[in-house]
Amino acid sequence: MNNIVITGVTGQDGANMVEYLLEKTSYNIHGVARRASNPNYVNCQKFIDNPRFKFVYGDLSDAVSIDGIVQSIKPDYFINFGAQSFVGCSWDIPLQTFDANATGVARCLEAIRRFHPACRFYSAGSSEEFGDVDYSPQDIQHPIRARSPYGASKAAARHLVKVYRESYSLYAVHGILFNHEGTKRGEEFVTRKISKGVARISKAINNHKPFDPINLGNLDSKRDWSDSEDFVDGVWKMLNQTTPKDYVLSSNETHSIREFVELAFSEAGIEGVWHGSGLNEEYSVSTKYAISKEPLSSILVRVNEKFYRPAEVDLLLGDSSPAREELGWQPKTSFNQLVKKMVEHDLNLP
């Protein structure tokens, strides 16, 4: 029986991977989730009752559980999306971040090496590994210059994958994924924070109620944003080559948080203008919009110093040419389409 194990299955990428594989393959999918008193399965609603899907309990910090999963399931593929995935928190919990994101990968690789070396392993990397970039766009050869514990943990995971691939001839790959978002994105991430905030403000205006602004950090940070649903296709293609090889997945475009804000409000039909500078900069409803709609509040976005990182990554721009040429991978969703999709989804939430 053909089996796939996916960690981080309740998160954005894990859930999108399950949906993709249930549609594109005939494999049985085993989704690894940590035991929780109040589990959150909101991202799993489309497949939670599918007969080819099964939840299994496990934790990347617990070698016994990972060993047991590999021994009992003997998966053909082990796709690791489990992580401490929030960059901002990684300064607060650096050891937990490193244990989940780097040592957790070592536990997976060891389990595969010892109990089922035919299994193909995927490690989810990040453009945060590049950090304070040397050149743009960043390709797979770009040096590691991480500027956060999160970025450092993902860089360590990449080296571990390389060591196990070369030492034990495992099929193990580490994909460098640039920023990718979608309707399943956690609300602490800036893109979903913006789309949810826009929906909240839009509903308040339509109901003639006051609203609080969205609080953001560095508006001029530039990121290479794509749709997570496009990336899971690239991940699957990485796992099914004759020879294991690491790749970058990216849109090959960069956009600022400021651009994301403007486009998100525009998608909701709200016209805004920037004024002020630095920590005093704000995005407010335009005079024309205020006259037309008469909102009870005016400030849409406010800069808040607490959302600045201790060491900022100002620019990330990927070069995914090898993935496009060698894997035949191609993203389907543009930046504008991604923002539209997220805002429309959150506007339609109850």
Image: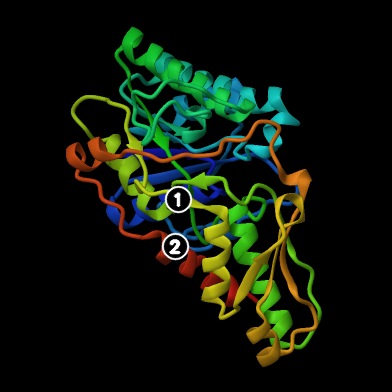
Return the residue nearer the eye: 74 or 247: 247
The picture places residue 319, in percent across and down from the top left corner, at 32, 38
Residue 294 x %, y %: 74, 89
Q: Which residue is mark 2?
A: 338
Name the N-terminal-most of marks 2 and 1.
1
221 sits to left or right of 274: left
Q: Determine whether, in the image, residue 199 is placed left or right of residue 340.
A: right
The kind of residue tagged 2 is Leu
Does residue 350 appear in the picture of this structure? yes
Q: Residues within 10 Å of mark 1 (few under 14, many from 20)?
A: many
Picture quadrant where residue 275 is located: bottom right
| Amino acid type, residue under disc 1 in the picture | Trp
> How many marks can you see?
2
Tag 1's secondary structure?
loop
Query: Is residue 61 among what the camera can see?
Result: no
Instruction: Classify mark 2: residues with Cα within 10 Å, few (<14), some (14-19) or many (20+).
Output: many
Query: Is 155 or 302 nearer to us in this picture?
Result: 302
Could you tell me how far apart the alpha carbons at marks 2 and 1 are, in whole angstroms? 9 Å
Which residue is painted at 36% across and 36% down in the image?
137
Residue pictured at 40% horizontal, 52% vertical: 52
Q: Secondary structure at mark 2?
A: helix
Do callouts 2 and 1 mark residues in contact (Cβ within 8 Å)? yes
* Quadrant where the image shows the N terminus: top left
Q: Nearer the viewer, residue 101 or 52?
A: 101
User: Is residue 287 toward the left or the right of residue 318 in the image?
Assistant: right
| Residue 225 numbered mark, or none | 1
The location of residue 260, given as percent across then percent down, is 53, 60
